[in-house]
Image (cartoon, grey):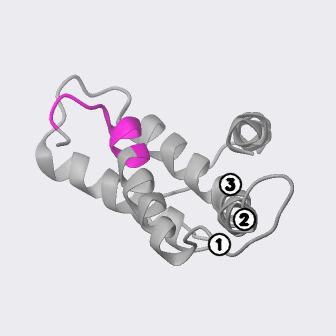
Amino acid sequence: PLQGLNPSMASLHGSLRNIQGWLQDTPPDDNAKARFGNPAFRLWHARLVQRSRSIVKTILVCHKKYASEEQYDDELLEQCSNDGFHAASLENYNNTSDKKSGNDGEDDSDEEKIITELITYLH
């Protein structure tokens, strides 16, 4: 299923595979008497908010790490997919393939701004 994807989309694919499993962890509460939606969704959404930074950061890491490559082999795509899956698994996932580039910190600040902006789309 990863054929034709770039590394960042393979990472997103991995995260979505994991997020889909959250539905079994937080099934709708059929007995809920909530006026605005099912309370189980609040739990699901809280998990998404907790893990959104890790998910977005992992997508960006895969994008930056492999942006210069024209062809993506299956092993590379599988690694990014697994990284995305693990990013959605843990609240504060630290991607082991995320290496600091040795820049003066300005790139890190710009990256942090991008991450902060993108996670708002997940909330």
How many residues crowd around disc 2 within 10 Å: few (fewer than 14), some, or many (20 or more)? Answer: some
Q: Is residue 14 left or right of residue 19?
A: left
Between the residue at mark 1 and the residue at mark 3, the CA separation in whole angstroms equals 9 Å
* Of callouts 2 and 1, the N-terminal one: 2
Between the residue at mark 3 and the residue at mark 2, the CA separation in whole angstroms equals 7 Å
Q: Quadrant where the N terminus lies?
A: top left
> Callout 2, which amino acid?
Gln
Between the residue at mark 2 and the residue at mark 1, the CA separation in whole angstroms equals 6 Å
SS under mark 3: helix
Q: Residue at x 43, y 59 (%)?
A: 20
Task: Report which residue position mark 2 lands on.
Answer: 50
Q: Are marks 3 and 2 in contact (CB under 8 Å)?
A: no
How many residues crowd around disc 3 within 10 Å: few (fewer than 14), some, or many (20 or more)? Answer: many
Labelled disc at residue 11: none
Q: Residue at x 86, y 56 (%)?
A: 35
How many residues crowd around disc 1 within 10 Å: few (fewer than 14), some, or many (20 or more)? Answer: some
> Callout 1, which amino acid?
Glu
Q: Position of residue 7 (x, y in %)?
A: 33, 39
Tell which of 99 and 74 is nearer to you. Answer: 74
> Callout 3, which amino acid?
Arg
Q: Residue at x 34, y 52 (%)?
A: 80
Task: Report which residue position mark 1 lands on.
Answer: 91
